[in-house]
Amino acid sequence: MGRYVARRLLLTIPVLIGASFLIFAMVYALPGDPIRALAGDRPLSPAVQAALRDEYNLDDPLWLQYAKYVWGLLQLDFGTDFSGREVWDIIERRLPVTAKLALAAVIFEALIGLAAGILAGIRRGSFFDNLVLVTTTLIVSIPVFVLGFVAQYLFGLRIPIFPTSGIRDGWYSYLLPGLVLASLSLAYVARLTRTSLAENLRQDYVRTARAKGLKPSVVIGKHTLRNSLIPVVTFIGADIGALMGGAIVTETIFNIPGLGRAVYDAVLRQEGAVVVGIVTLFVFFYIFFNLVVDILYALLDPRIRYD
Amino acid sequence: MIPTSTALSQTPSSPAPLPGAPVLEVEDLSVEFRTPKGVVRAVNGISYEVNPGETVAILGESGSGKSVSVQAVMGILDSPPGFVTGGRVLFEGRDLLGASAEEQRAVRGPGISMIFQDALSSLNPVFTVGHQIAEMFRAHQGTSRKEAKEAAIELLDRVRIPAARERVNAYPHQFSGGMRQRVMIAMALALNPKVLIADEPTTALDVTVQAQIMELLKDLQRDTGMGLLLITHDLGVVNEVADRVLVMYAGNVVETGTVDEVFSDPSHPYTEGLMASVPAVEDKGKRLQPIVGTPPDLSRIPPGCSFHPRCPRRVLEGAPPGKNCQDDIPLLLPVGTAGRASACHYRKEVLRARSAGTPA
Ligand SMILES: Nc1ncnc2c1ncn2[C@@H]1O[C@H](COP(=O)(O)OP(=O)(O)OP(=O)(O)O)[C@@H](O)[C@H]1O
Ligand code: SF4
Ligand SMILES: [Mg+2]
């Protein structure tokens, strides 16, 4: 197990390098001139422009820019944005915000998704089951930004029970955006739980559990659920990484100063160092949580062994 | 007699079982599956009994309702789509089908226990075998975790699993097929049931292991005096271990009697066919005669005798009144020596033909 984890961690290095290069190349390929964008309407003197281009290596070819960036990374230098702020500072300040948002989303995803899936799975064909089916289909088919605006309008403006923007209300401000961020995964979790539970209820060992004279609550809560939850738990785990990336849309809609919002702004300003730094961090989280899930998998299912 | 379960013994109206009385009686049990494609009548009014210490075998083609009938007895039918539509299941004289869910549950395990064909899929893959055995004590007797585990080790020992103390913490997939079936047996016997139902306990195992498992079951039965209800396709096993046999066809018992009598002198054409379709040592070299045709679709059971489309002895024209094979349903009626019965209009003729040594 230890060796397996070490190998997986080593493997993340080439993946991170590849991912960061791709992101770097994409930002490089963006049309327009970052310096002109920065300057806005006020024309900058050619001398200032040249100085800036030189400072941010903007006239170097792609490979050289990237090499210089990685060289910086190796010295734990994430670079700066155009106003001279350290990218690392931006990450340090904004990561907790995004982490809180993702945490709120995961809690919604797990609580509501699991509860809906379990109830639907136990009572297949019931009214509740059909309700879950229709609702989840609806959620999956509506784009997140539409859902976000609708939620903001309904619960922020029409029935003003949640703040619509910013994080001034502490945890309370994370509820609505967290729910919106969770919506898609929540629907998946409900569906996955339902299917998995229904499938496991048909298994022979569930029949055995009943033949043992166990209470229905034990037959379902212990013998069926434990097995049904294996794929669900792994999905939720892997989803944490994806949620942080998915926060870009939600943070923009709800004006939440997290990493996603920072990436959005940086893309508009073509600030390569910021975009690459944060997105690579997203990739790292994604890989990391996948590794956690694989380890969790082995803990949940004794038939799985990594050696 | 030791009370098998608190729920049953606490009920004052529960009649004390008479010594020598059957421990399990099934009366006119019917089961149907209500599926989108129609009603499947899997069990159609079967009756039998199991006495303490006795082994009763259920024989019959695939799909004849053997498993469904015992699942109904056990109260573990998949419902829906399965429903018991009639009959009684008496355990120590008390009707289980009319009992509360709580009372039924109290019988499963300490009263009636069951083992299944595929021990790998019948054991929960994510719990250790020790945990799954100990669960019997913990759920029914509230035994402490530690004591239950000790009891589990003892049981593993009793079903002759080597190094029981170490193996108790292993998972089902870490055992061989035969050892897994032993684990199943240990679990089923944990609370000393009065009746053990074994649904094809050896079908998934290879021949030498089959023999070991059957021997173990017989030994354990001798030690505990439990009744054994054994479903199997293996006529050899039936011949060796069973006292009585029930032959099932299309959800009915078509013949019953002691194994010796039924095997040597069938009184039902279906049983005759069954005997002719398996190789017997003394018949070496003779042609096997499989029963022609296929078992009926249980959602459209043929009228009259359900076996008539395949029966070589059927009488369709010029039959005596009430004995037309495609119109009149043959009831399970006594034939030959006491305790024998056959559901064939011509059971006496079948028996006589065999005894006279002129197989049809
Ligand atoms: N869950 C179910 N839904 C619908 N029909 C079922 C279900 N379970 C069993 N049946 C039907 O009940 C009939 C009897 O099945 P059963 O399993 O008792 O046969 P069996 O005699 O045990 O056969 P085998 O020797 O193959 O185990 C079958 O025809 C089957 O189609
Ligand atoms: S009743 Fe008729 S069809 Fe049925 S088994 Fe007897 S002879 Fe055959
Ligand atoms: Mg069966």
Image (spheres, rainbow, N blue to C red):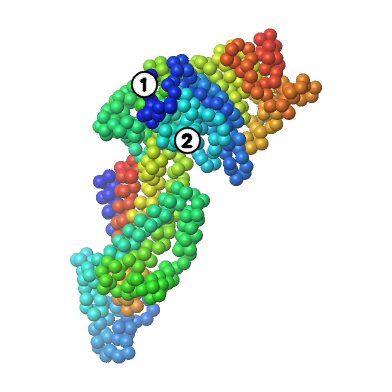
Q: Position of residue A294 (x, y in %)?
A: 33, 50
Q: Position of residue B203 (x, y in %)?
A: 49, 27
**Label 1 is placed on what type of residue?**
Ile
Residue at the extreme left of the image, as rendered: A75
Q: Chain of mark 2?
A: B
Q: Is residue B238 above or below residue B180?
A: above
**Label 2 is placed on what type of residue?**
Ile
Residue A298 found in image quarter: top left
**Residue at figure coordinates x 54%, y 41% from the top left:** B81
Look at the image and tell me whether residue A225 can be seen: yes
For residue B76, the mark is: 2
Q: Nearer the viewer, residue A118 or A248?
A: A118
- Asked if marks 1 and 2 touch (Cβ < 8 Å), the reply is no
Residue at the extreme front of the image, as rendered: B13
Q: Residues within 10 Å of mark 2 (few under 14, many from 20)?
A: many
Q: Nearer the viewer, residue B25 or A96?
A: B25
Q: CA distance from mark 1 to mark 2?
A: 25 Å
**Residue at figure coordinates x 49%, y 49% from the top left:** A124
Query: Circle 1 sits on which residue?
Result: B2
Q: Secondary structure at mark 1?
A: loop
Q: Chain of mark 1?
A: B
Q: Is residue A287 above or below residue A197?
A: below
Residue at the extreme top of the image, as rendered: B356
**Residue at figure coordinates x 76%, y 22% from the top left:** B321
Q: Position of residue B37 (x, y in %)?
A: 62, 44
In which quadrant of the rendered image does the C terminus of chain B lie?
top right
